[in-house]
Amino acid sequence: MELIAKINKLKAVVRKMRGAGNSIGFVPTMGALHDGHLMLVKKAREVADTVLVSVFVNPIQFGRGEDFEHYPRNLSHDVELLTRAGVDYVFAPAIEEFYPKDFDTYVEVERLSEPLCGKFRPGHFRGVATVVAKLFTIVEPDYAFFGQKDAQQAGVIRRMARDLKFPVDVRVCPIVREEDGLAMSSRNASLSPDERRAATVLYRSLCRAAALVLEGERQAGRVRQAVADMIQAEPLARLEYFEIVDTADFQPVAALQGGVLMALAVYIGKTRLIDNLLVDVP
Amino acid sequence: MELIAKINKLKAVVRKMRGAGNSIGFVPTMGALHDGHLMLVKKAREVADTVLVSVFVNPIQFGRGEDFEHYPRNLSHDVELLTRAGVDYVFAPAIEEFYPKDFDTYVEVERLSEPLCGKFRPGHFRGVATVVAKLFTIVEPDYAFFGQKDAQQAGVIRRMARDLKFPVDVRVCPIVREEDGLAMSSRNASLSPDERRAATVLYRSLCRAAALVLEGERQAGRVRQAVADMIQAEPLARLEYFEIVDTADFQPVAALQGGVLMALAVYIGKTRLIDNLLVDVP
């Protein structure tokens, strides 16, 4: 495993790989790695000759008052995990290397960025699309891997790659969960023991919502109310949103049919967590 | 010369070129070609193994009420000129091919897009940065050529390419002028004979401004006034702006020193023309 901090060094490595006809599988991360990330690495190893993981806490995807400063960082542990996972290259640039001081260019996926998390985190997906577009031009991956937990992010990136014609196969991998159903997230490390127990309410609510639909409920409004009630019953939790949306454009649907995405964001104490479930309405 | 309309066909050609180790010189145009464009082609031929010219009137860089519908188009004549000029590939996609109906991704270079033309054409440089970013990912050029007449456009594209790390050498070529000094532009074709004569006021004003500076004037305000007076004396002309700006960030300078860019936009009848001059203040 080789750890690379400079963009030009990475470009040289990429050029060599491509010259040798090696395909590149890319997993962009913000570090603080967990089994969800390692699943993405595993998928990358299955299809690509070379696996490259970036570790970069991207400042421009955090809003004012969000947790950029307190986002968990542990590069040496990440490098250890990635080495054991058989990764070939880890790209961990400094902020000033990635965003020189007169950096001025932003990539925005307009409509897909507006609903769900976009309503509560203005500029977030613009920061995500920008960092990933830049990473794609640097890394020139044949495959890139993202987690379904960030379903809207995955949709935004897939659309961005298609619209700008990046020659990359964007693959979205299923959510990896703890034993009690909590979706793996770097932010779970910020939870106190009590909060950690309370955090199971996200997945429990999603399961309850899916059960209602399987039992015959077809009105999104009633499902939303049931979820809101469940979250409210948990003293440490505060619901930011729960939406049932179209899987293609993330717009809310009123009457349930076909494939829908149930997505929610919940504050557990000061920690904001998200989760979602794809449901095929019978 | 091969004329290509489909993106995937072009990508296949590009892949073949790159596999063979051929460098690619790229000249993006909106067609209605003149000697300014042909100069860019000539420069491309001097440095690149393969020369590719795109002809695409980019709808998203035109604002409401601008001249998208009436922008001059003459693909068969353009193809003839480019064939004679020794171009290898002409890429002329249909609008629906380039922007599928749910296209949703835009590239914006923020600060550099604000002054000069950016003030009067909101969204223009966003349209330019988006089309060029997409063309860069499709064409993968080693060199790309732009005209100095669109000085701000060239600056925006150079910054975009640097910020997103496109591995392209952006080259800006000098303005090509008619015998009487009028900068070559596809829009000159829209001028009536009287307007064509009046249009020389752009270059005459720039020369007068430069002469004032060479004679010792160092206050931008006085130079601006002299140019405004000259434009006003031409009945068919209406000044949109004349600015003296820093060559790096396009911000207006008050006291003249070092290298400055003198740039103006003038309506001649209904036709909007731009021109500029780089001046090294003695």
Image (cartoon, coloured by chain):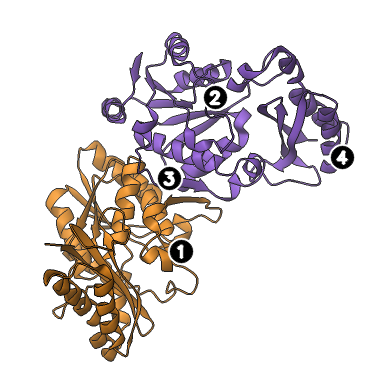
Chain colours: A purple, B orange
Report the amino acid beneath label 4.
Answer: Arg
Q: Position of residue B199 (x, y in %)?
A: 26, 82
Is B21 left, or right, of A273 in this rendering? left
- Residue at the disc numbered 2: A71
Res B15 → quadrant: top left
Name the secondary structure under disc 2: loop
- Residue at the disc numbered 3: A165
Report the amino acid beneath label 3.
Answer: Lys
Q: Position of residue A253 (x, y in %)?
A: 75, 46
Say if mark 2 contacts mark 1, CB within 8 Å.
Answer: no
Q: Position of residue B227 (x, y in %)?
A: 26, 78
Rendered position, A52 above or below B240: above
The answer to whether dots 3 and 2 both sit on one chain is: yes
Of the numbered discs 4 and 2, the one sitting upstream in the chain is 2
For the residues carrying marks 3 and 1, which lies nearer the camera in this image? 1
Is A131 left, or right, of A272 in this rendering? left
Tell me the distance, in whole angstroms, between the alpha carbons under discs 3 and 4.
41 Å
Report the amino acid beneath label 1.
Answer: Pro
Name the secondary structure under disc 1: loop
Tell me the distance, in whole angstroms, between the alpha carbons under discs 3 and 1.
25 Å
Chain label for disc 2: A
For the residues carrying marks 1 and 4, which lies nearer the camera in this image? 1
Q: Which mark is residue B122?
A: 1
Rendered position, B110 above or below B224: above
- Residue at the disc numbered 4: A222
Of the numbered discs 3 and 2, the one sitting upstream in the chain is 2
Report the amino acid beneath label 2.
Answer: Tyr
Tell me the distance, in whole angstroms, between the alpha carbons under discs 3 and 2.
32 Å
For the residues carrying marks 2 and 1, which lies nearer the camera in this image? 2
